[in-house]
């Protein structure tokens, strides 16, 4: 229920990356690349970046992404959108300030967990269907093993040093949305209040 509602209300790329259930096990043959990506995520303590989101219809959204590992992430869209997404205490909380609407879904087993899990192990959660490495970028494409037709998530890294620059979501209809990180900062001091999710309204309790 929450997935259907959120997909109607916010741009799909961040939602798809955060809410989509993860899969099991990866293909073999690219162990060194996978280990590097795991080490990259596991080395992050805090992260702050602006993001630019280009939706499949050409519309553009922007905002700020904040991460404090383990477990906490905040995505705040810039006006005119009044939408925030927070992960904390094992939940993803979606907050629409304009509508005064709060909804939640479990964090466990979603792609959001990849960004904030204490010990990231791709082989425990995702199936790697493609790795492309050239002078410009390293790309790793992930799908759900139990339902590959649901879509794909591609993480795009710059190399030397390795750094996440973009993710690309392709939905089951083949529509593509890109989220690009800008001016990423690591090891920044983040106010814990950023990750305090609003309490759900009584009618939203049924969606847990």
Image (cartoon, rainbow, N blue to C red):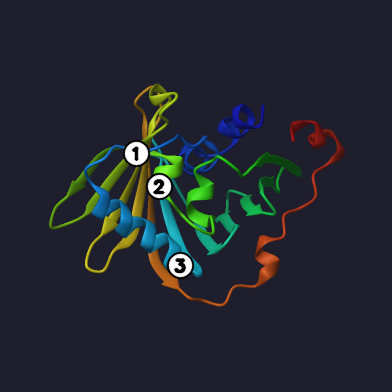
Q: Which residue is mark 3?
A: 44
Q: Secondary structure at mark 3?
A: loop
Q: How far apart are labels 2 and 1 at the CA level?
A: 7 Å
Q: Is residue 121 above or below residue 158?
A: above
Which of label 2 and label 3 is nearer to you?
A: 2
Placement of the N terminus among the 4 image quadrants: top right
Q: Residue at x 23, y 53 (%)?
A: 138
Give the quadrant of residue 130.
top left
| First of labels 3, 1 by sequence position | 1
Q: Residue at x 50, y 70 (%)?
A: 45
Q: Which residue is mark 1?
A: 26
**Label at residue 11:** none
- The residue most toward the right is 202
Give the quadrant of residue 164.
bottom left
Q: How far apart are labels 2 and 3 at the CA level?
A: 16 Å
Residue 160 in the image, given as x and y percentages of width and height: 22, 68
Placement of the C terminus among the 4 image quadrants: top right
Q: Which residue is mark 2?
A: 122
Residue 83 in the image, given as x and y percentages of width and height: 62, 48
| First of labels 2, 3 by sequence position | 3
Horizontal placement of 183 versus 86: left or right?
left
- The residue most toward the left is 135
| First of labels 2, 1 by sequence position | 1
Horizontal placement of 192 versus 64: left or right?
right
- Front residue of 191/100: it is 191
């Amino acid at each position: 229920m929450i997935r259907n509602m959120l997909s109607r209300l916010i741009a799909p790329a961040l939602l798809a990356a955060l809410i989509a259930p993860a899969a099991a096990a990866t293909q073999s043959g690219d162990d060194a690349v996978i280990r590097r990506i795991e080490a990259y995520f596991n080395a992050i303590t805090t992260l702050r970046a602006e993001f630019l989101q280009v939706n499949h219809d050409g519309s553009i959204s922007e905002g700020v992404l904040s991460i404090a590992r383990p477990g906490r992430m905040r995505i705040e869209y810039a006006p005119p959108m009044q939408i925030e997404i927070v992960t904390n205490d094992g939940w993803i909380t979606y907050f629409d300030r304009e509508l005064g609407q709060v909804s939640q879904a479990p964090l466990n087993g979603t792609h959001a967990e990849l960004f904030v899990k204490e010990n990231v192990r791709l082989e425990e959660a995702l199936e790697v269907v493609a790795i492309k490495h050239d002078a410009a970028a390293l790309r790793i494409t992930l799908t759900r093993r139990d339902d590959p037709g649901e879509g794909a998530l591609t993480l795009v890294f710059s190399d030397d040093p390795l750094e996440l620059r973009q993710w690309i979501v392709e939905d089951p209809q083949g529509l593509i949305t890109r989220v690009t990180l800008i001016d990423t900062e690591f090891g920044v001091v983040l106010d814990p209040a950023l990750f305090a999710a609003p309490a759900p309204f009584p009618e939203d309790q049924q969606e847990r």
